[in-house]
Amino acid sequence: MPAIDLNSDMGEGFGVYKVADDEAMLQVVTTAHIACGLHAGDPEIMARTFAMTKEKGVAAGAHPGFPDLWGFGRRRMPFSAAEIERLVAYQIGAAQALASYSGTRIGHVKAHGMLGLLAGDDADVANAVAKAVKAVDPSLISFVIAGTEGERAADRHGLKTAREIFADRAYTDKGTLVPRSQPNAMVEDPTAAGERMIQMLEAGAVISLSGARIPVAIETICVHSDTRNAVAIATEVRRRLEAGGWTCKPFYT
């Protein structure tokens, strides 16, 4: 049977503030990206979340973002490519340390929020993220938005990639994500999310709001943990995948 990874971002609270139900999501997904303390998270949350991934047998990685707690890493910030490279390296190191402290390890990196979107559109940013991953640990898998500059940069630097589509986000006709500020950017109905993932996998393409199909390779599906109905969406996506003959499994354990 074909295999597919199902992933989500986690550890995105701060101090006593909780953003999502990580415990419930870890019952469903096969891979987790752990916030590294700049857009969200802190050492306590990181250690606790890494420990949970180990307990549940879920693959864990670093989820670096812009240093923007107020904006949750979803605002553009005026860093140079070189500064972004060091920001990403810094956060990968934090994730490695807290994972080791918790008795596990990280096996991948996925840029968060605006940083991830910029890495999809801007070759300089994509190159900075890829260079940071390669410099810290070239064996780490680079999670990239399928068919974007992020994928091409990872390939140029010889990194292993996990090419990703999104169950809870809509696409433009260019194959990019519809900005969250625009209507219909989010897919919050579990049934609709599950159906569109099957359609995209069968088509080997992302399908835009207008119905356009943009061919891409697909290896992993993301459900953002802070999306409304996130756990229900992930549960329905996994149910539909398995009913369709797909095996949900991580790239590594």
Image (tube, helix red, strand yellow):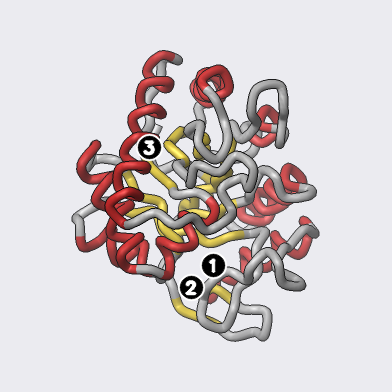
The residue that disc 1 covers is: 201
- Going by the numbered disc 1, the residue's amino acid type is Leu
The residue that disc 3 covers is: 252
Residue at x-position 46% and y-position 33%: 60
Graded by Cα atoms within 10 Å as few (under 14), some (14 to 19) or many (20 or more), the crowding at tag 1 reads some
Residue 70: percent from left, percent from top? 64, 42
Which quarter of the rendered picture does the C terminus lie within? top left
Residue 14: percent from left, percent from top? 64, 28
Q: Please state the total of marks drawn on the protein image.
A: 3
Q: Looking at the picture, does residue 234 appear above or below residue 210? A: above
- Going by the numbered disc 2, the residue's amino acid type is Gly
Q: Are marks 1 and 3 in contact (CB under 8 Å)?
A: no
Location of residue 219 by image quarter: bottom left
Location of residue 139 by image quarter: top left
- The Cα atoms of the two marked residues, 1 and 2, are separated by 5 Å
Q: Nearer the viewer, residue 180 or 142?
A: 180
